[in-house]
Amino acid sequence: MEIKRILDDLSRGSQTVVERVQEVLAALHEGSRGTQACINAANTVSGIIGDLDTTIMFATAGSLNPQRDSEKFGDHREAILKTAKALVEDTKALVAGAASNQEQLAVAAQNAVRTIVNLSDAVKNGAVSLSSDNAEAQVMVIHAVRDVAAALSNLIQATKNASGRSLHDPAMGHLKEAAKVL
């Protein structure tokens, strides 16, 4: 009878430990939402950079041709400028997200990724409209957005590292430097 009571107590105690561990894991998961969003964002931006590198190779080879001859770069200029301005605002929110809560950081990271995808597409469409006769300009324009994507990747990494740190932490200094580059 004594052994049964001990086993019952042990079973109840084990169940309590399991419940508490689940609560801790849930809190950790919730507390890292922004950090995880930054990791996902960095992976997505890395893919964008790879795509832009491939597009640069096609442009360098002179095989980036417009679908319609009537298309002009000016047709894409407004979309590029509008999206670039949106990216500036998104990067400000991303930097601010490092000092705020995980939810705001997650939203800022997701918005920045969405905007760099849109900017990349707008610039590629604009570059294609230049025609392969102007391959050097195509490469230059695509390389510019590639540089922006690389700077954003660095900023996302710096934001992830600075998240939750004090303003005097070296990671915050690195974040400020990364923000200046972008």
Image (cartoon, grey):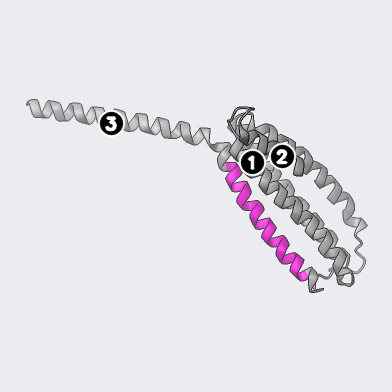
**Residue at screen point 80% across, 55% down:** 144
What element does badge 1 sit on? helix
Answer above or below: position of 37 versus 46: above
Q: Position of residue 158 (x, y in %)?
A: 64, 41
The residue singled out by tag 1 in the image is 158
Tell me which amino acid carries mark 2: Glu
The residues tagged by marks 2 and 3 sit, at their Cα atoms, a distance apart of 49 Å
User: Sequence order check: which comes first, mark 2 or mark 3?
Assistant: 3
**Residue at screen point 71% across, 36% down:** 176
**Residue at screen point 70% across, 43% down:** 112
Tell me which amino acid carries mark 3: Gln
Say which mark, if any, is on residue 15. Answer: 3
Looking at the rendering, the stretch of residues picked out in magenta corresponds to: 37-58
Q: Is residue 182 visible?
A: no
Callout 1 environment at 10 Å: few (<14), some (14 to 19), or many (20+)? many
The residue singled out by tag 2 in the image is 177
Asked if labels 3 and 2 touch by Cβ distance under 8 angstroms, the answer is: no
Horizontal side of 112 relative to 72 (left or right) equals: left
Callout 3 environment at 10 Å: few (<14), some (14 to 19), or many (20+)? few
The C terminus lies in which quarter of the figure? Answer: top right
The residues tagged by marks 2 and 1 sit, at their Cα atoms, a distance apart of 9 Å
Q: Position of residue 14 (x, y in %)?
A: 26, 31
Asked if labels 1 and 2 touch by Cβ distance under 8 angstroms, the answer is: yes
Query: 61 or 84, which lies in front?
Result: 61
Name the mark nearer the viewer: 2 or 1: 2
* Farthest left residue in view: 1
